[in-house]
Amino acid sequence: MFRNIKIIYRKELVDVIRDRRTIISMIVVPILIFPLLTIGFSGVMANLMQKSAAEKHKIAVINKDDAPDLYALIDSSSKVEIVSTDISVDSAKQAILDKLIRAAIIIPDDFSKKLANGETTSVQILYDASETKSDFALEKVKDLVTGYKLGILNSLLADRGVDPSLLEPFSVAETNVASKEKMGGLILSIFLPYIIILLSMLGAMYTAIDLTAGEKERGTLETILVSPVPRWQLATGKFLTILTTSVVSTSLAIISMSATMLYGMQSFGRMGEDMAINITPLMILIILLMMIPTACLFSALLMSIAIFAKSYKEAQSYLSPLMTIVILPALVAFLPGVELDLKLAFIPIVNICLCIKESLMGHINWIYVAIIFITTFIYASFAIFVTHRMFQKESVLFRS
Amino acid sequence: MITVKNLTKVFEDKKRGRIVAVDNISFEVNRGEIFGLLGLNGAGKTTTLRLLATILKPTSGTASLDGLDVVKSPEKAKAKLGFLTGATGLYARLQAREMIRYFGLLYGMSEADADKRTDELIAIFNLKDFAAVKCDKLSSGNKQKVSIARTMVHDPEVIILDEPTVGLDVITSRAVVNFVNDEKKRGKAIIFSTHVMHEAEKLCDRIGIIHYGKIIAVGTPDELKTITRCNDMDDVFVKLVEDNGNVS
Ligand SMILES: Nc1ncnc2c1ncn2[C@@H]1O[C@H](COP(=O)(O)OP(=O)(O)OP(=O)(O)O)[C@@H](O)[C@H]1O
Ligand SMILES: [Mg+2]
């Protein structure tokens, strides 16, 4: 009995490994996806942020003659560049929308005179809130104008012999208490479980199709059914092969992920380091505990659907929507504020995703881990049972 | 020896409704006998043979292979059977030798026995130069040879061949026919289905004509010629089928 299963398993594994598609989806994709994603994602993000912030934004100053001091201050700043002083308000607005300039300061008539007389007046800043760069420009211009304002205020107070610190009876200090793990975990712990679940399914998909619909297409299903091996042993051998590819691709994904976190993120400087999660052996243990029953569930599910199809193509068209359906619950981890509770712990895939997410953030609740591990195995057993039933049905095996 | 008793298979097809592919068929094939199964396309040959191979379950009736009932003990019956149809393909990514050996193991041979038997079959079928070639790279003649070697790996008592010479050149199909004759001399019970009437006439001891799922005539080629008063096997066949044309 186990002899037959072993013979079938060994042959299927050899067969599947000789297929380039399996190697790509089982080995190449899981290894490369994490480095590529981090390079792509963090690299682009860091680059954009730095560039935007460091850029010398082009601005316009309208009616500069009524505020020579303020103009001189802005002109001497290295953060902005005044490119125009003689345009109308309307053309300044248009220039911002056209991204020719990022902001414009409108100085009211008789600004300096009014200031000297102690009259109130106001400076207007034009910007485009839908543009990141314009936002940055607004911040910089505001800083400059506020600095100028404080300077005037201080000298006014000093003239009247008042201590400027009177203006601020107390100060407010903000301190971020989140550890580095948590900060990084927040962003990555949402992404990583999603990708791992996706890879464990993707790793099994080609093998599942190849061993079922692929056999029908190539006409080998009938050959193997003629052999005296009971069908349940055949189904078990195939299931174990599919499970193997899923587990291999999941493990490679976990290794690649940890290595990327450990060595890869530093190359993005401070921002990369801030985002990286310090992955501990305990976290890896939990991810494995979550992913092994999940791999069983996926393997059986993919197999029982693919066996319906008559050809490779047909199987792919069945499994692509399944892919979306299964991945949808994984997106729950993306929702802010969703936390693992007793109800969610029983919902397949959602529970896996949340459990991995929370353990990456450093919250480990062994009771939930146990509940999820066991329930996922129960779901998987049910899927395996269905798969075996499919292998007994001639209406499935010989669909015309 | 093969005994077929009131074998019936009904398919419930969504588009075509109820199809009686095999309709209450009975016949026997003795040891050392080649039984030819002849019929038009869609007559029910392949379905009958699949029922014998336990790939499909009969709707009613049964059959036995070497005394083992295909419904009650399918696995044991299958162990006695060598089965080859146009639909029994080869694993494309396995080498010819791996393919034969794999089935040897599945039939319960030890690794050493499977190796030995594989070498033997490779010699019999002249496959030495192709033993390490992957099956999808073989010519159709060599593919068929590997398939037959796979069928014979456990030296079965009962052999069922569904159109084994289709698409083969003269030399290769002659080799297949000679092989089948040798197996007959070794006392095997053989069913051979074909479209080629002259091949059937030369090779088969008895012929069963199947039409719309029913056996409409059984006999030696000479008996069939006498009944229909025709001399040519093609004419015999056409006459029998036309006489039963309204059966459906
Ligand atoms: N799985 C199935 N589901 C529904 N109908 C089927 C199925 N398999 C065969 N049939 C139908 O049963 C009938 C007999 O088919 P079968 O393949 O046994 O004929 P055949 O004699 O082997 O023909 P050929 O010479 O073309 O190989 C046909 O009408 C076929 O369409
Ligand atoms: Mg046929």
Image (cartoon, helix red, strand yellow):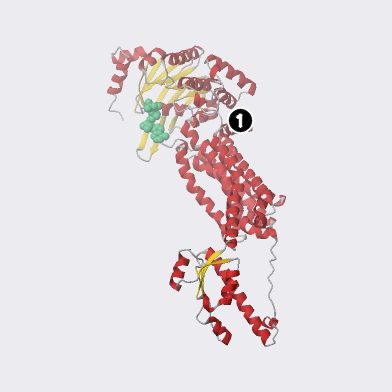
Question: Disc 1 designates what residue?
Answer: A7
> Is residue B114 shown left or right of residue B184?
right
Residue B70 picture location, percent across and down: 50, 28
Residue B99 picture location, percent across and down: 55, 25
Residue A392 appears in the rendering? yes
Q: Quadrant of ligand 2?
A: top left
Residue A379 picture location, percent across and down: 58, 49
Front position in the image: B135 or A161 = A161
Residue depicted at x 45% and y 40%: A314
Give the amino acid at mark 1.
Ile
Residue depicted at x 71% and y 51%: A280
Outermost residue toward the right in this view: A281
Q: Examine the image and state in which quarter residue B8 appears.
A: top left
Q: Examine the image and state in which quarter residue B20 appears.
A: top left
Q: Is residue A281 above or below residue B187?
A: below
Q: Is residue A225 above or below residue A47?
A: above
Residue depicted at x 54% and y 45%: A301
Q: Is residue B216 above or below residue A218?
A: above
Does the beta carbon at disc 1 come under 8 Å from ligand 1? no
Front position in the image: A143 or A379 = A143
